[in-house]
């Protein structure tokens, strides 16, 4: 009996142990000046790596870029996705839902490359459309003001359907009679959305929001493939920073310190999320 | 007339649910539609509420046309009817108070008036103490009362109730339904309730209608319908035995028989003790016949009985 109980939580426990062990090891490494390129033993530097990283303007920029990205992309995706889910739910176009999975099934690399060939100012598809009209295609990815928003736009395009699927699943759990009760009670469009359907899908919407927030923190592939953090450091996100400063130059100590800082920042979102999930389960 | 349906027809796919249903309910009347499951009872209420649009026919509320199966269609939110769904369909994210207040909020009534009206109806239904709770924290009976309160609070033109007592504890059901009926009658609200429970229909209805194959085959006061069912279907639904004898169809009540002697012979299938009498299930020439007898019949394979009072229908 006891064994059966333990075996049920064991896989999760192993995963958690591995994660915590990795984190502890990262904390340990972050206290050393340790480069794989220089053939010498690691030096203990205390919080030196942290001071160095935190005072690095590029890191500060990366925090700002990442937080802005997370806020802009995740919030837009959740608002747009919730709106679309509500529209699909109320209009009954539920046959459309399998199509929503398509952007999620395409590998990010293919998606980004497709996007690149669409908007690149020299070779892009849009350039061929716009040029004969006498217009000039703006260089989105080369312009520090546009590059960031091009990546936000791509993320919204790819991941809004994820929000739609999650929120729609929540809405489909609402008993149909409740909607009819609301109409009999006199609810028109606006009240139906904001007093009945959206509050009843609240858990799903919050879950989608939290998942998107956490996932958006780890934005890497899109940025790396399109801009590598540039132009300048306009699209330097935390993971790109981690790669360019820690992993690529094999500067293990700095990389570990950045990883720990990212984990800490993500926890700010992740911990309320876990709390929310637990509270919903108890209710 | 508070509610009138004229020649209402409705199909769902190939299933022809309502086939020319006529119904007239006068103001303040408590009308019960009685019928077995799947005969279109809920559909009838949904047509009155505007949730379902008929394929043909007309619907009137307070003598004004609200649906003619064509251009005229007043949607549910503008019909001012109250609806107690079988599942109660309460808003799970709102407290009982907010559930009951919802129709008044939608009507844009001032806050003080809403508060007063909600407390008033909650007082009537005895749920004043639980107004701050959410549906998940209420008992089944309390949920049902909240649903009734929500339907009554705006003083609807018609109150529609779909099997409202089927989820109530059987021991409490009789007293609950009598109490709620009294509240509704005191408020003078026109009610259409549907049920498959004959006893319930007869004890609550001012008039009842028997729904069979998509139309009301008989409408009348409970005792009229009980004593003089119009036709074999109504008789069967009112609990009569039907027996075909020499080209005639006899309908007789289980209590209107004499067991032990008579012209009929039945094969005994089952004997149950029912308190006031014994119920004997028999098979007579292929038809199931129920007999009530004050004495326990001898454990025989066959039983003789005579019919004291019967209604005769032409067959065919």
Image: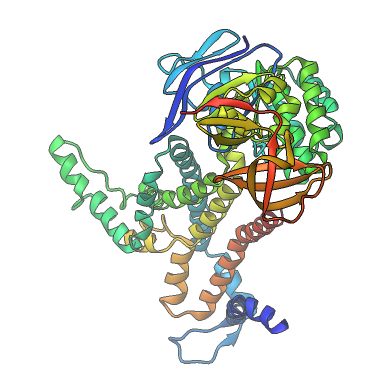
Quadrant of res B167:
top right
Front one among B100 and A18: B100
**Does residue B70 lie above or below A158 as drawn?**
above
Q: Residue at x 83, y 37 (%)?
A: B130
Is residue B131 positioned above or below B225 on the image? below
Q: Residue at x 41, y 56 (%)?
A: A235
Relative to A212, B135 lies left or right: right
| Residue A224 falls in image quadrant | bottom left
Viewer-side residue, B64 vs A136:
B64
Position of the N terminus of chain B by quadrant: top right
**In the visual, does B17 lie left or right of B233?**
left
Place of residue B131 in the rendered image (x, y in percent of width and height, measured from the top left): 81, 34
Q: Colour scheme used in the picture?
A: rainbow
Question: At which x and y percent is residue A154?
Answer: 37, 51
Which residue reaches farthest left?
Answer: A132
**Residue B57 % position (x, y):** 45, 17
Number of numbered callouts drawn = 0
Is residue A183 among what the camera can see?
no
On the question of residue A59 being in view, the answer is: yes
Decide which of B190, B258 is in the foreground and name it.
B258
- Tell me the residue at 77%/18% (across/down): B185
Q: Position of residue B191 (x, y in %)?
A: 68, 21
* A44 up-or-down from A232: above or below: below
Give me the residue at 32% from left, 63% from top.
A109
Is A132 positioned to the left or the right of B225 in the image? left
Q: Observer-nearest residue: B191 or A156?
A: B191
Q: Residue furthest bottom?
A: A40
């Amino acid at each position: 009996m006891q064994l059966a109980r333990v075996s049920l939580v064991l896989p999760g426990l192993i995963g958690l142990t591995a994660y915590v062990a990795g984190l502890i090891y990262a904390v340990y490494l972050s206290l050393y000046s340790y480069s794989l390129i220089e053939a010498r033993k690691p030096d203990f530097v205390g919080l030196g790596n942290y001071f160095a990283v935190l005072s690095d303007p590029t890191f500060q920029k990366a925090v700002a870029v990442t937080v802005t990205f997370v806020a802009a992309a995740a919030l837009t995706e959740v608002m747009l996705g919730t709106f679309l889910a509500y529209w699909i739910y109320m209009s009954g176009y539920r046959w459309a839902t399998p199509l929503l999975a398509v952007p999620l099934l395409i590998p990010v690399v293919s998606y980004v490359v497709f996007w690149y060939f669409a908007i690149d100012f020299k070779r892009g598809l849009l350039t061929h459309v716009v040029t004969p009209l006498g217009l000039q295609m703006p260089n989105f990815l080369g312009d520090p003001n546009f590059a960031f928003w091009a990546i936000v736009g791509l993320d919204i395009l790819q991941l809004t359907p994820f929000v739609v699927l999650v929120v729609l699943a929540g809405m489909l759990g609402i008993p149909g009679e409740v909607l009819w009760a609301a109409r009999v009670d006199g609810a028109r469009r606006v009240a139906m959305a904001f007093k009945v359907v959206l509050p009843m899908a609240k858990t799903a919407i919050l879950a989608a929001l939290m998942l998107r927030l956490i996932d958006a923190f780890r934005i890497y592939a899109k940025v790396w493939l399109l801009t590598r953090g540039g132009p300048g450091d306009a699209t330097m996100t935390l993971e790109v920073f981690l790669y360019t400063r820690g992993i690529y130059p094999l500067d293990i100590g700095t990389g570990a310190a950045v990883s720990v800082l990212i984990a800490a920042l993500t926890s700010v979102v992740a911990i309320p999320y876990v709390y929310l999930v637990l509270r919903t389960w108890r209710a | 007339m508070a509610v009138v349906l004229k020649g209402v027809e409705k199909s769902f796919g190939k299933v022809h649910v309502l086939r020319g249903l006529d119904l007239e309910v006068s103001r303040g009347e408590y009308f019960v539609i009685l019928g077995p499951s799947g005969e279109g009872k809920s559909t009838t209420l949904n047509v009155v509420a505007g949730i379902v649009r008929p394929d043909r026919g007309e619907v009137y509320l307070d003598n004004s046309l609200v649906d003619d199966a064509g251009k005229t269609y007043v949607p549910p939110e503008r019909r001012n009817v109250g609806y107690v769904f079988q599942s109660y369909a309460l808003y799970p994210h709102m407290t009982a108070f907010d559930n009951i207040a919802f129709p008044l909020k939608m009507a844009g009534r001032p806050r003080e008036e809403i508060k007063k009206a909600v407390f008033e109806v909650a007082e009537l239904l005895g749920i004043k103490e639980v107004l701050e709770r959410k549906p998940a924290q209420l008992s089944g009976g309390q949920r049902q009362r909240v649903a009734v309160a929500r339907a009554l609070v705006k003083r609807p033109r018609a109150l529609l109730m779909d099997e409202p007592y089927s989820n109530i504890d059987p021991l409490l059901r009789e007293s609950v339904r009598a109490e709620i009926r009294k509240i509704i009658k005191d408020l003078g609200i026109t009610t259409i309730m549907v049920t498959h429970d004959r006893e319930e229909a007869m004890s609550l209805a001012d008039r009842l209608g028997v729904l069979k194959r998509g139309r009301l085959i008989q409408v009348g006061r409970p005792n009229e319908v009980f004593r003089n069912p119009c036709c074999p279907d109504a008789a069967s639904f009112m609990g009569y035995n039907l027996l075909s004898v020499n080209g005639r169809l006899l309908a007789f009540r289980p209590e209107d028989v004499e067991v032990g002697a008579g012209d009929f012979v039945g094969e005994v299938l089952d004997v149950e003790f029912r308190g006031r009498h014994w119920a004997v299930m028999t098979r007579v020439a292929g038809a199931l016949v129920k007999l009530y007898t004050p004495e326990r019949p001898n454990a025989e394979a066959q039983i003789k009985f005579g019919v004291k009072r019967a209604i005769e229908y032409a067959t065919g």
